[in-house]
Amino acid sequence: DTAVSQTPKYLVTQMGNDKSIKCEQNLGHDTMYWYKQDSKKFLKIMFSYNNKELIINETVPNRFSPKSPDKAHLNLHINSLELGDSAVYFCASSRIDTQYFGPGTRLTVL
Amino acid sequence: TQLLEQSPQFLSIQEGENLTVYCNSSSVFSSLQWYRQEPGEGPVLLVTVVTGGEVKKLKRLTFQFGDARKDSSLHITAAQPGDTGLYLCAGDQTGANNLFFGTGTRLTVIP
């Protein structure tokens, strides 16, 4: 059974478009996260949600907006995509001190 | 500047050799975690260390948290090709599980 799932796995789009990445976890965790991993494999937190409240926003451009319809889902919406947004985006969830990561979504902006 | 610096950045060794990866910072962490990430997948937690000087063993992997809780090391004994991957340390400063990840060490074990 998949613990943390993301869709799509790959996303190729043109600059200026708006896109969404979906994330679902079936672990019953209270906190979910979005991370960005750049081409040098550096992983940086973007957002976390705890009980549908945003508790971290690491100076991410406001073109990025997390949306949590319920505790099991945290979707990432990106408006006006830029070339520099190309990266792998990971969703994660946690309870206490262990984070479980999804398989990632590779976003390529052309 | 990166909060957590890992060294080496790349490491290629023969099967059976030993290796150590370092994770260093000038900041104090309430806990530090090590993850391994394989191509096309998300990071997977290997261990969490919380006490200064703590040593944890996971089969052939030995993890140590520095006495001052600013650094950590990962030692692998008799490396196997299955150990190949990207190793990431991650520190939590506040105890709220807000992780800062290290710069990563890409390990290749050659059969």
Image (cartoon, grey):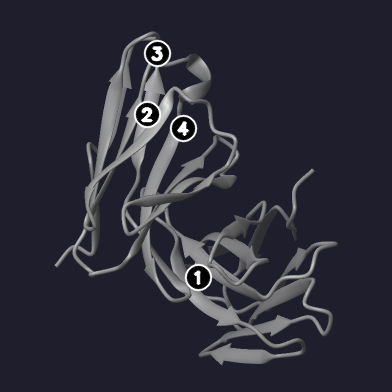
The residues tagged by marks 2 and 4 sit, at their Cα atoms, a distance apart of 5 Å
Secondary element type, mark 3: loop
Residue shown at the point (79%, 81%) measured from the top left? B66
- Both labels 2 and 1 in a single chain: no
Where is residue B13, by image quadrant? bottom right
Give the residue type that dot 2 points to. Leu
The tag on residue B83 is 1
Are the residues at dot 2 and dot 4 in contact (C-beta closer than 8 Å)?
A: yes
Q: Earlier in the sequence, mark 4 or mark 3?
A: 3
Marks 4 and 3, how far apart in space? 15 Å
N-terminal-most mark, 3 or 2: 3
Asked whether the residues under the numbered discs 2 and 1 touch, taking CB atoms below 8 Å apart as contact, a structural biologist would say no
Chain containing the residue with disc 3:
A
Sequence-wise, the earlier of marks 2 and 4 is 4
- At 55% from the left edge and 68% from the top edge, which residue is drawn? B96
How busy is the neighbourhood of tag 4: few (under 14 within 10 Å), some, or many (20 plus)? Answer: some
Callout 4 and callout 3 share a chain: yes
Reading the image, the residue beneath label 4 is A87
Mark on residue A107? 2
Q: Residues within 10 Å of mark 1 (few under 14, many from 20)?
A: some
Task: Tell me the distance, in whole angstroms, between the alpha carbons under discs 1 and 4.
Answer: 25 Å
Q: How much space separates mark 3 and mark 1, taking CA atoms?
A: 40 Å
- The kind of residue tagged 4 is Ala
